[in-house]
Image (spheres, helix red, strand yellow):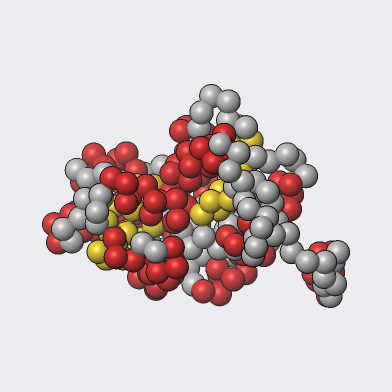
Amino acid sequence: MLIRVINPNTTRSMTEKIGASAQRVAAPGTRIVATNPDSGPVSIESHFDEAISAVGVADEVRKGEQEGTDAYVIACFGDPGLLAARELTRAPVLGIAEAAFHLATMISTRFSIVTTLSRTGIIAEHLLQSYGFAHHCRRVRAAEIPVLDLEDDGACALNRIVDECRRAKAEDNIGAIVLGCGGMADLADEIRDAVGLPIVEGVTAAVKLAETLASLKLGTSKFGDLAFPPPKRFTGRFEHLSS
Ligand SMILES: O=C(O)C[C@H]1NC(=O)NC1=O
């Protein structure tokens, strides 16, 4: 089985970290290809960053379709371009936020999210609403760290995240915590050991769910709104997308 794990930002070290975390939990017969767009934001910390990154996600899915990909993971907590990506393939496509929410509600009745910056918390709130998990989430918290601090050993990002997770455990009356950034993919075990709560991490959650869907031959439905896009002429820098 081939799973393409797409980091929608363009920071290669984060892509490699995400890919290593994905391969670590993948089944023996699963090959992980971790990619990121060549063009786009180095980190995704705003609605604008999300919008621009969605074009790169679509491009990566189009490349994956040429390589016999069995499933896709969008490894950014805003799940950018998720529905557009699903239109482009018969394979299952999972966003790490949606995957994490599903698993969190299977092990707890209430969870909180700890993400990077409070500015992007609204994106998680919108996803909770649209996916139907809002009543399960007690609070969307932020460690107030720039995303790329997760790539800087000297930034003490782990300590900031653990501190916020401890506040969530003490104050939110929850059973689990969802990590709100693809760049936290390698931190779940350390955070769980430090905080003493189940920690749901989206990249690994999405990889295992992708394996499940692909093995059950449950790909993206082509009946209804996720059918392939209708033929369309595109102009300017998107002219290559015309069909
Ligand atoms: O939304 C966030 O704060 C985190 C999000 N940004 C990013 O570059 N990868 C992510 O998972």
Does residue 94 appear anywhere in the picture? yes
**59 sits left or right of 144 in the view:** right
> Seen in the image, is 206 located left or right of residue 232?
left
Q: Quadrant of residue 238?
A: bottom right
Give the percent coordinates (x, y) of residue 223: 66, 58
Q: Residue at x 56, y 48 (%)?
A: 73
Residue at the spot x=57%, y=60% of the render?
Answer: 82
Q: Viewer-proximal residue, 90 or 120?
A: 90
| Front-lying residue, 174 or 152 | 174
- Looking at the picture, tell me which residue is in the foreground, 131 or 172: 131
Residue 3, relative to residue 147: is it above or below?
Answer: above
Quick one: which residue is furthest to the left in this view?
170
Q: How many marks?
A: 0
Quadrant containing the C terminus is bottom right
Can you give x and y, in whole percent of width and height, for residue 47 in the image?
51, 74
Residue name at image x 32 percent, y 51 percent: 105
Q: Residue at x 68, y 55 (%)?
A: 222
Residue found at the far top of this picture:
28
What x and y, as percent, mark residue 109? 24, 54
**Screen quadrant of the N terminus:** top right
Q: From the viewer's perspective, is residue 140 above or below residue 72?
A: below
Taking the image as drawn, is residue 3 in sight? no
Which of 198/104 is in front?
104
Residue 199 image position (x, y, % from top left): 30, 46
